[in-house]
Image (spheres, rainbow, N blue to C red):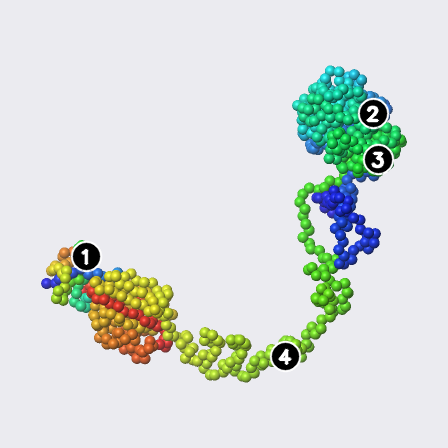
């Protein structure tokens, strides 16, 4: 079942006529073609009437009626006036919503129902003691405190009966109160409410009013000009009270306390005397009409609260009118002659409605109740089919995508209307600016002659042919032993067939590497960057400093006291068991002193290691340290002054799992020496233990006051065989 | 009679140990006095050396601590 709609579409519902244009007959017959651009006015017309019919069809059906029986007493109703409680919401207890103030064979009576549309839903209420005759019923009042009213006509003693909305029984005793009226008030004819503060009512020759707080005690207002006729009706236009007499006199007062003050006489109704009645329409328009007139007569409308009236001629002529009501955006007229009930959109053009026939029976009054129209007759209330409410809730879109039945455009570009033939595709035709069915030329793949072939061309604009991947590669090289690599600008081959060569990178290309190059890459020597990266400075003493810069470590121990400085790096060596490490040093100042030490430390930690150091007096010393005591292993005289200051002196420590060797040598041009002077080899387990680490430290110190400056120029390490 | 004067040692660690080993080889003794002053004591000093004081005959009896290896 389709979901109940949550919105009522409206389109151009109040547009100027020029904005709605009915499409011509030919277009209504055939519809539109691709590329047509119908004017907006056509769409306005279509959408307006489609939505208008939706709104009309969901409204109460004036073609389908049900007859509710009125249980009159003795004989049928001779008058009936409908009032509807349109304010009270249906809740736990049923609302006595519909009231008819009537006169039947038993006299004044009230017929009431909870909801019309049930054949036996009306109940007759009695025990009304008013001496006058029920005239009309009304329902009005402040929001939340609305009341039913029955005006009672009498030559000298009018009454005004009232009860609160949704009263329990609505019988004469217990439910209705006869309001206290000013002395001498004659038959009361009509009641109206100003929407916020005051009720007003017209009696035969007076006007009375009362505020919200005292609905049952009324006071007299003053007529600015004496009335000559008999008041017949009273309405609130939205901005003013308007009252009319049977002589066509029109009186007006403002809302609030002005209703209890002086009413102003306006110009009389243009035709003069008639049994005038008023009905309020849309936007405060008041329709004036003559009751029960058996001849054609104009209606009159005012939009300025009675200052001026405009004649309206009904078509067809609606005569013998008992009541006119405006509700749900339509005018309804109840008449004493067939068709007994009329409907109009504008109070000008009227449509005859078709009530169920129950003889020739007048419709006395018509009202709108809970989406149905009620038409009160002599023994029945005709009830129309009820309007459909719009559903509450949030619109939930269906996420399922739909296909477009027939697209004329693809992404803003038109599709050609030419039908495609078998195998064609849509291709863009820039000369027609349309996607056009096109046969694809040369689009098929070449036939393969074997497995694993791919299409390949021989040049720009040539036809593709099937070739094998090896055949494609052969276009680069077909020589045994060559490898494919990406060169600086193209794929190329290179010879990798030479024995005992290896393929690797040289920093730029993939190339052949000799065994020596491979050994060097794996074993070393690996040169420190000499930029201090990752080295941590030792705590200094005596104002000494160890500074990285210009690809060297410059150590300075100033004169004036003993001094020391240095720097260390952990996890320096690739292997803690097998290594070679050598440092190149150059004495800058303080050469020739036994109070100087400069050297290299390797080991497990700062408190467990081995070392080799140079005295600038020439001695090269090696030893080991346990965290407390340095134990010298050897300290022969060794280097010459030139060795120490020439910048090519290396100090070296080498370790294997079975021995630690300490040596020095002099190289040239910054390269490692080709020959080394070994000053000591230890196979001692303690020495081996302390040398088994990857931490490296460089240091310089003085044991007396001497200006000692020395540079570390290089630091190389390698795996066995790398040096 | 040995004489001594104040000296500065490197921070505790390898450099201090190497310093003490070096001065010991040079026939000097480094003491920490009872007042926690570090002094270097030699039997002979170069001519004109300033700031010398006489080293007690029994420095340990004076509460001194020997720092150089024996």
Residue behind mark 2? A273
Position of residue A486 relative to residue A386, above or below, is: below
- In the picture, residue A268 is in which quadrant? top right
| Contact check, label 4 and label 2, Cβ < 8 Å | no
Residue behind mark 3? A314
- In the picture, residue A542 is in which quadrant? bottom left
Disc 1, SS: loop
Depth check, front residue: A555 or A658: A555
On the image, the x and y values in percent for residue A450 come to 65, 79
Disc 3, SS: loop
Q: Is residue A532 visible?
A: yes
Residue behind mark 4? A458
Picture residue at 53% right of the left edge, 79% below the top? A493
Residue behind mark 1? B37
Counting residues from the start of the chain, the first of labels 3 and 4 encountered is 3
Asked if residue A370 lies left or right of residue A322, the reply is left
The Cα atoms of the two marked residues, 4 and 2, are separated by 109 Å
Position of residue A405 relative to residue A590, above or below, is: above
The Cα atoms of the two marked residues, 3 and 4, are separated by 92 Å
Picture residue at 74% right of the left edge, 57% below the top? A405
| Contact check, label 1 and label 2, Cβ < 8 Å | no
Both labels 3 and 1 in a single chain:
no
The Cα atoms of the two marked residues, 2 and 3, are separated by 19 Å
Quadrant position of the C terminus of chain A in the picture: bottom left
């Amino acid at each position: 079942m389709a979901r109940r709609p949550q919105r009522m579409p409206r389109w151009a519902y109040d547009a100027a006529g020029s904005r709605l244009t009915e499409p011509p007959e030919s277009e209504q017959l055939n519809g539109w073609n691709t590329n047509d651009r119908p004017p907006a006015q056509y769409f306005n017309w279509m959408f307006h009437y489609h939505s208008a019919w939706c709104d009309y069809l969901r409204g109460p059906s004036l073609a389908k009626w049900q007859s509710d029986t009125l249980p009159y007493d003795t004989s049928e109703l001779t008058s009936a006036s409908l009032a509807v409680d349109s304010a009270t919401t249906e809740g736990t207890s049923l609302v006595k919503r519909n009231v008819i103030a009537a006169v039947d064979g038993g006299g004044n009576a009230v017929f009431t129902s909870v909801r019309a549309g049930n054949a036996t839903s009306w109940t007759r209420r009695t025990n009304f003691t008013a001496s006058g005759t029920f005239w009309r019923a009304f329902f009005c009042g402040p929001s939340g405190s609305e009341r039913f009213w029955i005006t009672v006509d009498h030559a000298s003693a009018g009454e005004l009966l009232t009860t609160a909305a949704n009263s329990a029984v609505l019988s004469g005793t217990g439910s209705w109160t006869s309001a206290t009226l000013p002395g001498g008030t004659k038959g009361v004819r009509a009641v109206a409410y100003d929407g916020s503060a005051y009720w007003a009512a017209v009696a035969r020759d007076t006007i009375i009013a009362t505020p919200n707080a005292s609905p049952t005690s009324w006071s007299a207002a003053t007529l600015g000009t004496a009335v000559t006729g008999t008041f017949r009706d009273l309405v609130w236009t939205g901005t003013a009270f308007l009252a009319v007499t049977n002589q066509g006199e029109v009186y007006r007062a403002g809302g609030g306390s002005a209703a209890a003050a002086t009413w102003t006489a306006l110009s009389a109704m243009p035709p003069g005397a008639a049994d005038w009645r008023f009905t309020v329409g849309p936007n405060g328009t008041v329709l004036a009409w003559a009751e029960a007139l058996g001849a054609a007569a104009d209606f009159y409308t005012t939009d300025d609260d009675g200052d001026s009236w405009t004649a309206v001629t009904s078509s067809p002529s609606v005569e013998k009118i008992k009541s006119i009501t405006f509700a749900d955006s339509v005018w309804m007229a109840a008449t004493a002659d067939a068709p007994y009930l009329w409907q109009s959109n504008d109070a000008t053009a009227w449509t005859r409605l078709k009530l169920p026939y129950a003889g020739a029976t007048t419709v006395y009054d018509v009202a709108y109740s809970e989406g149905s129209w009620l038409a009160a007759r002599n023994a029945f209330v005709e009830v129309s089919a009820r309007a459909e409410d719009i559903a509450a809730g949030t619109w939930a879109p269906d996420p399922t995508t739909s296909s477009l039945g027939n697209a004329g455009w693809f992404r803003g570009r038109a599709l050609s209307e030419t039908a495609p033939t078998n195998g064609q595709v849509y291709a863009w035709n820039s000369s027609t600016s349309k996607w056009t069915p096109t046969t694809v030329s040369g689009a098929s793949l070449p036939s393969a002659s074997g497995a694993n072939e791919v299409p390949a061309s021989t040049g720009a604009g040539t036809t593709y042919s099937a070739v094998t991947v090896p055949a494609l590669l052969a276009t680069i090289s077909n020589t045994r032993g060559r490898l494919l690599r990406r060169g600086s600008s193209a794929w190329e081959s290179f010879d990798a067939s030479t024995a005992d060569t290896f393929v690797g990178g040289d920093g730029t290309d993939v190339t052949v590497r000799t065994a020596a190059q491979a050994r060097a890459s794996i074993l070393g020597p690996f040169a420190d960057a000499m930029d201090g990266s990752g080295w941590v400075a030792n705590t200094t003493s005596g104002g000494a400093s160890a500074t990285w810069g210009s690809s060297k470590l410059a150590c300075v121990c100033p004169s004036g006291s003993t001094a020391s400085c240095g720097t260390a790096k952990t996890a320096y060596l690739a292997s803690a068991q097998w290594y070679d490490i050598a440092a190149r040093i150059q004495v800058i100042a303080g050469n020739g002193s036994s109070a100087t030490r400069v050297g290299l430390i390797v080991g497990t930690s700062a408190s467990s290691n081995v070392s080799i150091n140079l005295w600038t007096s020439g001695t090269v010393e090696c030893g080991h340290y346990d965290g407390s005591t340095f134990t010298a292993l050897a300290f022969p005289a060794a280097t010459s002054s030139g060795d120490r200051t020439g910048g090519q002196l290396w100090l070296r420590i080498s370790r294997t799992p079975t021995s630690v060797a300490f040596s020095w040598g002099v190289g040239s041009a910054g390269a490692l020496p080709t020959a080394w002077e070994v000053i000591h080899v230890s196979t001692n387990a303690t020495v081996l233990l302390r040398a088994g680490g990857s931490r490296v430290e460089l240091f310089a110190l003085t044991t007396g006051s001497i200006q000692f400056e020395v540079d570390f120029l290089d630091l190389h390490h390698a795996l066995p065989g790398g040096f | 009679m040995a004489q001594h004067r104040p000296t500065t040692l490197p921070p505790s660690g390898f450099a201090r140990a190497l310093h003490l080993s070096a001065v010991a080889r040079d026939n000097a003794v480094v003491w920490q006095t009872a007042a926690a002053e570090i002094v270097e004591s030699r039997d002979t000093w170069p001519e004109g050396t300033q700031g010398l004081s006489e080293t007690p005959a029994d420095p340990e009896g004076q509460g001194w601590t020997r720092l150089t290896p024996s």
